[in-house]
Structures are given as structure tokens and as C-alpha cells.
Amino acid sequence: MKIVTTIEEIKKEIDLKKKEGKTIGFVPTMGYLHEGHLSLVERAKQENDVTVMSVFVNPLQFGPNEDYQTYPRDIKRDEELARQKGVDLFFAPTKEEMYPEEPAVTVKVTKRVDVLCGKSRPGHFDGVATVLTKLFHIITPDRAYFGLKDAQQVAVVTALIKDLNFPIEIVPVETVREEDGLAKSSRNVRLDEQERKEAVHLYQSLLMAKEMVENKVHDQEAIIEKMRAYITEKTSGEIDYIDILTYPDLKKPNALTGKIIVAIAVKFKHARLIDNIIIDLT
Amino acid sequence: MKIVTTIEEIKKEIDLKKKEGKTIGFVPTMGYLHEGHLSLVERAKQENDVTVMSVFVNPLQFGPNEDYQTYPRDIKRDEELARQKGVDLFFAPTKEEMYPEEPAVTVKVTKRVDVLCGKSRPGHFDGVATVLTKLFHIITPDRAYFGLKDAQQVAVVTALIKDLNFPIEIVPVETVREEDGLAKSSRNVRLDEQERKEAVHLYQSLLMAKEMVENKVHDQEAIIEKMRAYITEKTSGEIDYIDILTYPDLKKPNALTGKIIVAIAVKFKHARLIDNIIIDLT
């Protein structure tokens, strides 16, 4: 595995691979890798000749009161995990390399963002779309891999690709879970022992919702209320949102048909966790 | 010359050329071609194996009270001129092809836009940057050609390429002028006979400014005032702006050093004309 920190060098490496006619699979991450990320690498390796991973904690997608400074980082461990998993090119640029000055041009997302996590993170997805646009131009992948744990991000990236005609295929990959069902996340390490035990109930509440939907419960508010009561009873966390939306448009469904997403975010004392389940009712 | 109207087909054509190892030069236009555009084609042909021209009047870059509906169009004449000049691929998509629905993701320009034409056209350069991003992703050119008549556009596109890391070289091309010095423009046809005679004074006023700058006149306001008096005396037009700025940053210069631009916009009864001159004082 080649470790690269400058844009010039990664472009040179990619260029060499392209000249050999190789296809490029790309896994963009903010590092502190877990099995979720590694499942993206696995998938990328199956479908492409060369797998590129980026590790970059993107300041543009953090709000002023968010955890940019304290977002967990461990680049040496990331390198080791990526190497073990078979990443070919590991791109870890500095903030200065990616943003040598305040950008004059950015990408703006105006739909699919005023719900779920986007609602309480104004500008977050603008930052995500901007850094991905930059990375897509630098890496020029054939396919890019995103975990469905952040389903809203997948929905936004799908719109980014479509609306701006990127010549890239987006591959959404199923959420990887701990044995008890907790979705893998870089932020899980912050949970204390008690919170870690409670955290399993996010997924449990989603399975409960899925069962209700599949049993033809049509009252969306009733489903949300039942989840709310369950989380309140079973955890010490504060519910940020529980929502049922169409997928990937992320609009309020008139009826529970087509593809829908049930999504939840809960603030624990030491970390805010998200999870979701997409139910195909077509 | 191949005429193509769908994104799918132009991508297929480009793909074939790329597989043969050919370089792609791209001339994006809004049509109603004149010698200015054709000079871009000429330059593109010199520097690339394949020259692609797009003709698309982009609704996104027109304000609600601007001339989107009445912007001059003559696609048959454009095709003929492009063919004569040696364009290889002529891409003329419909509005529906480029914007099948209201986009959720667009490109936003926050610097270099609150001066010159951008000042009175809020959102104009967002529209320009968005359509160019789409076209760049569809055409994937090695080089893209822009006329310096719209120097602010060149400055914005330069920032677009740099800030979003497009793997494309921008080639700015000198303004082509009529024999009397009037910058070629699609809107010139709207001038009546008297206005057409007066229009020459835009360039004359710029040459006057250039001479003053080269003769070490340092008082920017004095230069602007002299131009203003000249235009007012010699034309029936209403001055929209006369400005002296750094180039390509488009900031107020502390002193007349480095690269500077003198730019002018004058509203005649039937058309608003712009022109500029870039003076290299390095």
C-alpha cells in the first residue's frame, strides 16, 4: 500500500493506474476506521482493479459548535487497518493541502438536507458535497463507496452525482453492526459502559418499526410514538429525532409505500448516535 | 462534424475518442456564434486532437428580469459556422436534457462576484459555475477555452477549477474585435446604427485608461472619472460601471501594480455592452 499526502502525488499515482487501463474504486472516509469502513474496502476490491481510500477530517462539514477538534483520529492505526484490508493507495492530505485558502467556490445542497441530521447541522452537507467534489476530481474513480449508516449522506451524494453529472457510480453498502446490532461508528468508542449497553436499543427500535410497517400499521405517528416511548424507557439518551421519510427523496410520505426510511438519532452524554433502516415496500 | 443533443450520446462519442488516446478541447458557448467564439475553436484545434463545442442557453445564469427568453438564438447558423471552423463534436442539449428537474445540488461562488457584472446579477455566476461543472463532467475535456471579453467569467472559472480541483486546464483567449475596436458580442446585433457607431468608444475609453496607467497616473478615481466623462460625451449609453481591479482576484487595488483590469459596462437602449483591458504592470 502506498501512502500519499499530496494532491500532486496521488494524481500521478492514479494516472499511472489509469494508463494501465485499471478501474478505480474509491472509499472516502474521515478515518478512525472500523469494520463499516473496511466493508466498503472489501466491496471496492471486489468491483475494481485499484482501491483508493482517503482519510480526511473535513473542517468544512463541521459547524462552529461541533466536534471537529475532538473528532477521533489515529492515522497510524488507520494505515495499518487499510494495509491489512488490501487498500492500494491511501490518501491522507492535510487541511492546508485540501484548503490552501478559503474557497471562493463551494457546492450547495438545497434538497434532502432540511430533515434528519441535516436539520440540526446547517451547512453540513454543503461541506460534505464540496469535499467529495474535490476528492472525486482528484481521484477520478469509476465507483465510490458509501455506508448506508449515514443514509442521508448517501441520498445527498446520489443527488450530487446526478445533478452535476459526475461520471461516477455511487455504491451504497449495508450498515455493519456489532453482534448485538449496534451500528459500527467511529464515535462508539466514546460511550461509557452503561451507554454502550443502552445503545443497542436504537437498532431494536428500528426493528420494531419495521415489524409494525410490515404488519400494515399505516399510522406513521403511532410508529414514531412507540419508538420514542421505547427509547425513553430503555436508554438515558435524549432523542434528537425519529423520522419516517421517503427514500432517497427524504420527503414526508403520504402513505407507507415505495422505499421508506426510518431513522433515529439519540444524544448520549458522550456521543450522539444515528441509525436507520430502509424498508422496500414496492 | 457530429451533432449531438443527448448527454448519453455525447458521452459515448467522447468515450470513443478517449479510448483512442485523443485529447479533448472544449468550447462552451450560449450560441449565436461570432468570431470571438470561433477564435476559441481555432485555439482549441491547435492544442487538442478533438474539439467539442457546446451551445446551450443556460437558464440558471439569467435573473428573473433578464433576457433568457429573448437571448438571440440561431442553432442552424451555429451548426454551419462550427462545421466550417472544424468543430468535431457539436453538443446542443435541450433545457430538459440538462435540467430534467430542479437541481438539489448547485455550485456557489462567493468571491470575485460582488463586482463588475456580478454586482448587478446576483446568482449569475452560480448559474455559470453550475452549468460548467455539469458540462465539464459530461465532456471531460483536457482544456476548456474562454474569451477574455468576459474577464470576470474567466476569473470565476479559474477559481472554480482551482477550488474544486477540476483536472482541466483553463485557456483564456484574447478578445476578438471589429475593425473599429468594438468587442465582438452576440448582443451587438441589437444595436441600432447610431448606437453601433457610439459603441466603439467603450474600447477607446479603455485604451485611454491604459495610456494613463502606463504614463504612471496613480489616481484610480481620476482615471475612472476621465473615462466616465468621455463615455458620457461620446455616447447615448448609460454607464453601468467603470472599475479598476486586481486580476484575477477582482479586488480594489491598493496601488496600480501587478495585473490589473479596467472594465466597463454601458447600457444602450437595445443592448448592454461590456469590455475590458488587462494591464500587466508586474
Image (cartoon, coloured by chain):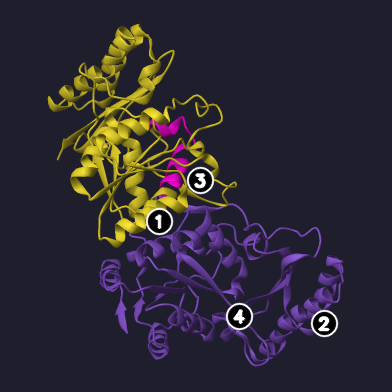
Chain colours: A purple, B yellow
- Reply yes or no: does residue B124 show up in magenta: yes
Secondary structure at badge 4 equals loop
Please tell me whether mark 2 or mark 4 is closer to you in this view: 4
Secondary structure at badge 1 equals helix
Q: Chain of mark 2?
A: A
Secondary structure at badge 2 equals helix
Please tell me whether mark 1 or mark 3 is closer to you in this view: 1
- Callout 2–callout 4 Cβ contact below 8 Å: no
Could you say which disc has been placed on residue B98 in the image?
3
| Amino acid identity at mark 1 | Lys
Question: Which is more toward the observer, B24 or B71?
Answer: B24
At label 4, counting other C-alpha atoms closer than 10 Å, the crowd grade (few under 14, some 14-19, many 20 or more) is many
Q: CA distance from mark 1 to mark 2?
A: 57 Å
Please tell me whether mark 4 or mark 1 is closer to you in this view: 1
| Amino acid identity at mark 2 | Glu
- Magenta region: B116-133
Q: CA distance from mark 1 to mark 3?
A: 16 Å
Instruction: Report the residue at 42% width, 37% height from top.
Output: B114
Q: Check if mark 4 and mark 1 are on a common chain.
A: no
Q: Check if mark 1 and mark 2 are on a common chain.
A: no
Q: Position of residue B266 (x, y in %)?
A: 37, 19
Does residue A55 lie above or below B150 as drawn?
below
Q: CA distance from mark 4 to mark 3?
A: 34 Å
Q: Which residue is mark 1?
A: B12
Q: Is residue B165 visible?
A: no
Q: Which residue is mark 2?
A: A233
Q: Check if mark 1 and mark 3 are on a common chain.
A: yes
Secondary structure at badge 3 equals helix
Q: Which residue is mark 4?
A: A175
| Amino acid identity at mark 4 | Thr
